[in-house]
């Protein structure tokens, strides 16, 4: 019971934090959640250099928050890393499939 209440408090705290970090992303054309470069990197187990590189190529949207700080649009972030992961999975499946094809067609 007490544990559950604690978890709920943490959740509502996160939601408040998210609202404070939301801003209009011109590339998405809507209000998005913003992330710092460090948070973006941590979320996808990469480093800030990777995030800066992706932001530089336009794969990630850079948005200024109310303090004028450059943040990352979370929608572009999730899109970018989801696509990346899908590509990795696809190539893995393709490899496995061609291995299996060779095995079954070896003679
Ligand atoms: Zn965006």
Image: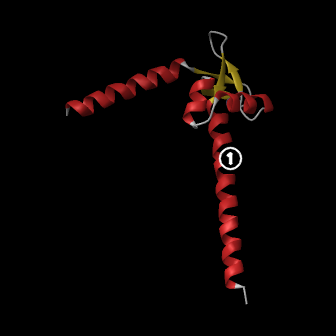
> Which image quadrant for residue 94?
bottom right
Its colouring scheme is: secondary structure
Label 1 sits on a secondary structure element that is helix
Q: What residue sits 65% from the left and 26% below the top?
A: 72
Mark 1: give few (<14), some (14-19) or many (20+) Cα within 10 Å.
few
- Front-most of residues 8 and 54: 54
Residue lying at the far bottom in this picture: please name it: 107
Residue 10 seen in this snapshot: yes
Across and down, in percent, residue 57 comes to 80, 32
Indicate left or right for 47 with 54 as reference.
left
In this view, the residue farthest toward the left is: 1
Locate residue 27: give its quadrant: top right
Decide which of 93, 74 is in the foreground and name it: 93
Residue 35 seen in this snapshot = no
**Who is closer to the viewer here, 37 or 103?**
103
Instruction: From the image, tell me which residue sits under label 1.
Output: 84
Q: Picture coordinates of residue 24 (x, y %)? A: 66, 22
Q: Quadrant of residue 104?
A: bottom right
- Relative to 30, say whether 20 is above or below: above
Query: What residue is at 56 percent from the left and 27 percent from the top?
Result: 39
Residue depicted at 62% across the width and 39% down the height: 78
């Amino acid at each position: 019971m007490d544990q559950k209440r604690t978890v709920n408090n943490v959740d509502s705290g996160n939601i408040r934090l998210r609202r404070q970090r939301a801003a209009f992303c011109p590339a998405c054309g809507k209000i998005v959640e913003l992330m710092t470069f460090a948070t973006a990197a941590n979320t996808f187990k990469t480093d800030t250099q990777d995030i800066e590189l992706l932001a530089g190529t336009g794969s990630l949207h850079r948005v200024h928050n109310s303090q004028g700080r450059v943040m990352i649009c979370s929608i572009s972030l999730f899109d970018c890393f989801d696509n990346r992961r899908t590509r990795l999975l696809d190539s893995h499946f393709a490899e496995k499939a061609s291995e299996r094809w060779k095995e079954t067609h070896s003679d």
